[in-house]
């Protein structure tokens, strides 16, 4: 009788025997938690229980579960409860987590995680989209009183009476295991020159880009797919360049200022302010978070040379991962310093040459590659120095492979945007007067704009 009264919740799939092994649940301070703790001292069930949708279709069956029911659970009888998607086959309760199968993924849902991620009632502020649960007050031994699946929603009742609802699709998209099965909305196209020659030009018209959010979305799509994009037929003015940049988001101001216009006058102590050739590199390695996008607009050039070089750093890095996994590992795990020095400026950025996303996939997130701005290598112990240099040498070989070098002669009115976390840029030496304007954009704001426009 006691088990039945605890397990009976109308309209839900109840697991009454699971109550008998609940040590404690809910917030630490609730009276319900203490009651369940006292009760569970008398009743302990060591085995985790499997409840298939066929069994869970009728709440009354849960209230009458017995030893014979547990024997049936091991046979993994298949079935479908009313309103449960076909992609859901079963779930299994463990001491500290719930295992749920959905769309071919086995989602392992820790009970603390579930309570912390509740979006129901006062646990979440839907107006501000902020969590309201005090994570530190969740009982580390929390377990649910009841678990139910109905109409594509996981319903959980906690010992303090709080009821949580989680859409299965939301769990699939926001859990560690689920994310391994999700294809990214926009996969980057890793390219070399041959690949680019077979692809359409990643460009939009300036006037259309300013007037149409669809064209803005196209530019962002190109920027994230290829790592660069062009805005064509822009007025050859600083104002037009700023308008193109601010169409995406606010400009990131650095010690170079909000906007720069440079030529070979060494106004700043940087090789960009010379007429020398510049090898492929990324900018802002001397900042702990490099700028996400760099905007270039060649305003004028009277002379020869000065062609722009682009290299897909992720393409080179994936070649390294394939051919030299140990080299990839050391370049992605060892942080190295970079710096920028002027009489009134001394910035230092520290991070690995190759930075990967957290999680099992280890997707590339960022490449820091700038030989000129690297500071003294004082972060690598002597026994690893040789391995680090060998790995960098191999990565450099892929970056400098002529098949990877895309050269373009920019013209006035053509604005180039590069994704600085991925694509390296450089230039050939030049003669005469060459003036280039541009600015930086913060990566977070660029990605935010892409999300709002449903690009990713």
Image (cartoon, helix red, strand yellow):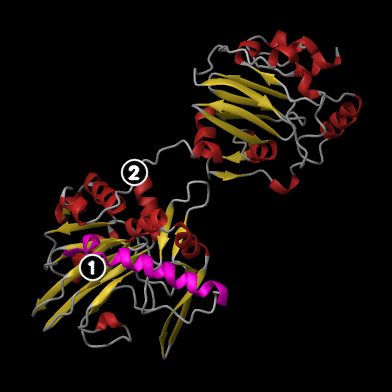
Residue nearer the viewer, 7 or 284: 284
* Residue drawn at the location 51% of the way across and 69% of the way down: 335
Is 400 covered by the magenta stretch?
Answer: yes
* Percent of width and height locating residue 266: 26, 88
Kindly indicate the quadrant of the structure image that contains residue 297. bottom left
Residue 24 rendering spot, x and y as whole percentages: 81, 34
Q: Which of 388 and 233 is in front in this view?
A: 388
Residue in front for this viewpoint, 395 or 114: 395
The stretch of residues the image draws in magenta is 381-407
Tell me if residue 334 comes above or below residue 125 in the rendering. Answer: below
The secondary structure that dominates the magenta segment is helix
Residue found at the far bottom of this picture:
343
- Is the Cβ of the residue at disc 1 closer than 8 Å to that at disc 2? no
User: Which residue is label 2 attached to?
Assistant: 186
Mark before the other along the chain sequence, 1 or 2: 2
Quadrant location, the C terminus: top left
Residue 296 tag number:
1
Above or below 275: residue 241: above
């Amino acid at each position: 009788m006691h088990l039945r009264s605890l397990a009976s919740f109308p309209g839900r799939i109840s697991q009454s025997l699971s109550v008998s092994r609940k040590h404690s649940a809910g917030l630490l301070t609730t009276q319900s938690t203490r009651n369940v703790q006292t009760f569970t001292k008398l009743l302990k069930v060591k085995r985790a229980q499997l409840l298939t949708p066929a069994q869970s279709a009728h709440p009354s069956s849960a209230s009458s579960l017995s030893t014979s029911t547990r024997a049936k659970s091991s046979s993994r009888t298949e079935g479908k409860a009313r309103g449960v998607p076909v992609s859901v086959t079963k779930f299994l309760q463990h001491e500290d987590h719930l295992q749920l199968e959905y769309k071919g993924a086995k989602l392992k849902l820790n009970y603390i995680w579930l309570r912390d991620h509740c979006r129901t009632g006062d646990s979440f502020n839907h107006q501000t989209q902020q969590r309201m649960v005090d994570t530190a007050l969740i009982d580390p031994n929390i377990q649910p009183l009841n678990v139910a699946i109905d109409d594509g929603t996981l319903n959980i009742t906690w010992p303090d009476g709080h009821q949580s609802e989680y859409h299965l699709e939301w769990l699939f998209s926001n859990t560690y295991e689920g994310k391994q099965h999700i294809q990214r909305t926009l996969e980057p196209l890793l390219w070399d020159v041959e690949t680019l020659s077979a692809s359409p030009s990643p460009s939009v018209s300036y006037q259309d880009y300013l007037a149409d959010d669809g064209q803005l979305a196209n530019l962002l799509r190109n920027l994230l797919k290829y790592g660069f994009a062009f805005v064509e037929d822009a007025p050859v003015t600083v104002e037009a360049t700023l308008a193109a940049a601010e169409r995406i988001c606010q400009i990131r101001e650095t010690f170079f200022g909000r906007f720069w216009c440079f030529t070979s006058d060494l106004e700043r102590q940087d090789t960009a302010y010379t007429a020398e050739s510049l090898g492929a590199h990324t900018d802002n390695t001397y900042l702990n978070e490099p700028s996400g996008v760099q905007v270039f607009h060649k305003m004028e050039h009277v002379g020869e040379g000065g062609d722009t070089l682009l290299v897909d750093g992720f393409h080179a890095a994936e070649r390294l991962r394939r051919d030299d996994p140990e080299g990839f590992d050391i370049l992605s795990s060892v942080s190295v310093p970079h710096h920028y020095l002027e009489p009134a400026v001394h910035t230092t950025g520290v991070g690995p040459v190759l930075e990967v996303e957290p999680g099992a996939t280890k997707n590339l997130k960022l490449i820091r590659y700038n030989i000129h701005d690297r500071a003294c290598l004082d972060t690598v112990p002597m026994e690893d120095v040789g391995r680090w240099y060998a790995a960098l040498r191999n990565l450099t070989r892929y970056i400098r492979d002529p098949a990877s070098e895309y050269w373009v002669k920019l013209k006035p009115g053509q604005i180039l945007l590069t994704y600085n976390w991925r694509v390296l840029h450089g230039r050939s030496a030049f003669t005469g007067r060459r003036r280039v304007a541009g600015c930086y954009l913060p990566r977070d704001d660029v990605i935010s704009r892409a999300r709002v426009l449903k690009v990713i």
